[in-house]
Amino acid sequence: MLELITDPFAYAFMRNALVAGLLTVVASSLIGTWVVMRGMAFMGDAMAHGVLPGIAIAYILGGNLLLGAAISAVVMILGVSVASARSRLGEDTAIGLLFVGMLAAGVAIISMGGAYAGDLTTILFGEPLGVSRASLRTLGIATAITVVVTVALYRPFLALSFSRAKAQVLGMRPTLTHLAMLGLIALVVVSSFRTVGTLLVFAFIVAPPATAALIARRVPVMIGVAMLIGGLSVVVGLLVSFHVGTAGGATIAGLTVLSFFLVLAGKEAAGVLPRVRRRATAETA
């Protein structure tokens, strides 16, 4: 039985996938906690899709995919800022417009480059079992930057999560703090798309922190629980993928979402049982 767990990680590609997944979990849990607390899930989803055109162009031209993704993320952030500031549209409408536009552009560009289905599948869903040493180094640097920035801006992030006006009164510069948060979301998406793809990285950013929010109230505890849930999902997902033959990134992402509903169901059950006991006691009294 133990061999079913240990034997897969005797292979170098499985160890690389494990390290890549855990690094992604650390970075995505840190920024994802703030995304969940601020209700920015739609922005995170849009950012994950918004990098697609840059990746597609770099892929077709034979350029650096990370650079292409980074440029596309900057365009996405600037586009949302300009559209929401220069029109009467709310930020959510601007995000929706850029989300659909960037995704459509990316798919259209990839379709011009030949092996459409295979290329699109790799970019959208990633290839965790094919992670290279160079990708691991990139992930490690991105994770380190995320940790440092999150620690340095903990108080501004916390104030902004409660109220933009309060953050302004406290001198926390909410606009710059918001841009820093968007920058971290972009960094996590760009650095981890090779591992889980542009679609599934959104699950890492939202699902573990959302699950942690059902259990914990304090931000540091939420981050720790999110990392634990994400880490377990990576390990179990890789094992399932190895033994059953499912797609690694999709399996891991699916488990992170499943964990949310399992915890939610557990909380509901825990709340129902005391009510049933109280009702039974009242009826027999």
Image (tube, rainbow, N blue to C red):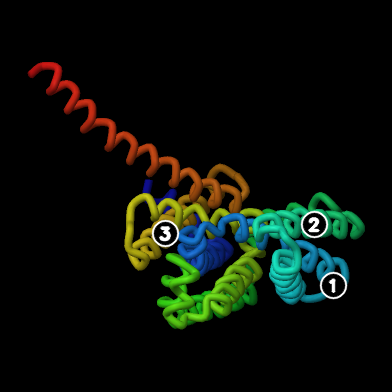
Q: Nearer the viewer, mark 2 or mark 1?
A: 2
Dot 2 crowding, Cα within 10 Å, few <14, some 14–19, many 20+: some
- Residue 54 seen by the camera: yes
Judged left or right of residue 136, residue 144 is: left
Is residue 24 rendered to the left or right of residue 43?
left
In the rendered structure, are the residues bearing label 2 and label 1 in contact, judged by CB atoms less than 8 Å apart?
no
Read off the residue under disc 2: 101
Q: Tell me the residue at 67%/58% (across/down).
A: 90
Q: For numbered disc 3, what is the local secondary structure?
A: helix
The residue at 65%/62% (across/down) is: 130
> Looking at the picture, how far across and down is residue 73, in whole percent?
71, 70
Can residue 65 be seen from the camera position used here? no
Marks 2/1: CA–CA distance: 23 Å
Q: Which residue is mark 3?
A: 226
Looking at the image, residue 141 sits to the left or right of residue 270; the answer is right
Q: Residue 169: x percent and y percent?
A: 44, 78
Give residue 127's quadrant in the image. bottom right
Distance (Cα) linking label 3 and label 1: 36 Å
Quarter of the picture holding the C terminus: top left
Residue 235, x across and y down, in percent: 46, 56
Tell me if mark 1 has few (under 14), some (14-19) or many (20+) residues whose alpha carbon lies within 10 angstroms of its own.
few
- Compared across the picture, whether 255 is left or right of 59 comes to left
For the residue marked with disc 3, what is the amino acid? Ala
Q: Which residue is mark 1?
A: 62
Say whether disc 3 or disc 1 marks the residue closer to the N-terminus: 1
Badge 1 amino acid: Gly
